[in-house]
Amino acid sequence: MHKSMLCLGNGLAVYLGNLQQTKTHAHHAIQIIMSMEGTMHLKIDDNEWGEYSALILSSNGTHECIVANTKKIIINLESRTAKYNCPSNK
């Protein structure tokens, strides 16, 4: 059994835990995903499916994920947080 952890900060969220399949979605945060067990299959925007062990997703980009019920680290950074000063792609 895997335990999960969520840490929240100013313009930042970090999740460590199991990740499962998602439907196509987007969010304003820039997202960094790292697999601690195996790989993930992701479809980004209208591109073909790809297999990744780590990935950085841009702000507001659509994506869909197929993964086994395995442990991942997900870091969400608000794209307009002054502390990180990450420009939006839109």
Image (cartoon, rainbow, N blue to C red):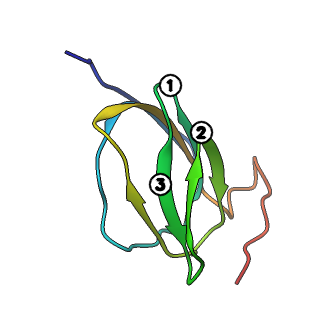
Residue under numbered circle 3: 41
Q: Give the residue displayed 60% in from the left and 57% down from the top.
A: 78
Residue 47 lies, in percent from the top left, at 60, 78
At x 57%, y 74%, the residue is 48
Count of labels shown? 3
Q: Sequence-wise, which precedes: disc 2 or disc 3?
A: 3
Residue 8 visible in this rendered orientation of the protein = no
Query: What's the CA distance linking mark 1 and mark 3?
Result: 14 Å
Can you identify the residue that label 1 sits on?
A: 36
Q: Is residue 83 above or below residue 2?
A: below
Badge 3: residue crowd in 10 Å (few <14, some 14–19, many ≥20): some
Query: Mark 2 or mark 1, which is nearer the start of the sequence?
Result: 1
Give the residue pinned by disc 2.
53
Q: Nearer the viewer, mark 1 or mark 3?
A: 3
Q: Nearer the viewer, residue 88 or 49?
A: 49
Whichever of callouts 1 and 3 sits on the residue coming sooner in the sequence is 1
**In which quarter of the view is residue 4 placed?**
top left
